Amino acid sequence: MPLANATQAEGVKVVSEDDMFRGVATVGGEVVRTDMDEELAYQLTKAVLDNVDAIVTKTPFLPNVALGEIEDTATTGMCGPMPLKYHPGAVRAWEEAGFTVPDCAKP
């Protein structure tokens, strides 16, 4: 976003080589150890998927972050800029909920 963004807090100065603010954020995602119990990863992912609508309505910015999106790798960054893989338990929960997990994002 350009530095002239109207939502920028007063008195905040961002210095960058091209007048753009960039930040790193993980919204609606969790990173777990590969050795996490598969059932635990499944239950955690299922709990989020079962409550996406309720979670989104409670946080103003969440409707804009593609929470619950998994199939569109251009939106998620999976299989490209973000080469992380889903935990096997998470894959099971996503697929059980009717989503298609991209092969490149499977362990």
Image (cartoon, rainbow, N blue to C red):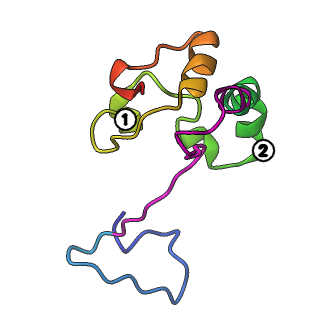
- Left or right: residue 8 versus residue 55 is left
Is residue 27 on the magenta stretch?
Answer: yes
Query: Residue 94, image x and y in percent?
Result: 58, 19
> What's the residue type where badge 1 is placed?
Met
* Residue nearest the viewer, comparing 8 with 50: 50
* Residue nearest the viewer, comparing 92 with 66: 92
Work out whether 4 lies above or below 96. Answer: below
Toward which corner of the image does residue 89 lie, by quadrant? top right
Mark sitting on residue 35: none
Query: Residue 66, image x and y in percent?
Result: 53, 35
Main secondary structure of the magenta stretch: loop
Question: Furthest residue to the left?
Answer: 17
Sequence-wise, which precedes: disc 2 or disc 1? Answer: 2
* Residue nearest the viewer, comparing 25 with 105: 105
C-beta proximity under 8 Å, tags 2 and 1:
no
Secondary structure under the numbered disc 2 in the rendered image = helix
Secondary structure under the numbered disc 1 in the rendered image = loop
Q: Which residue is mark 1?
A: 78
Q: Nearer the viewer, mark 2 or mark 1?
A: 1
- Please tell me how crowded label 1 is: few (under 14), some (14-19), or many (20+) other residues with Cα within 10 Å: some
> What's the residue type where badge 2 is placed?
Lys
Query: Residue 17, image x and y in percent?
Result: 20, 78
Q: Which residue is mark 2?
A: 58
Q: Residue at x 53, y 14 (%)?
A: 99
Work out whether 5 lies above or below 53. Answer: below
Region in magenta: 21-43
Query: Residue 2, image x and y in percent?
Result: 33, 68
Is residue 92 on the magenta stretch?
Answer: no
Look at the image and tell me in which quarter the N terminus lies. Answer: bottom left
Look at the image and tell me in which quarter the C terminus lies. Answer: top left
Q: Residue at x 34, y 44 (%)?
A: 82
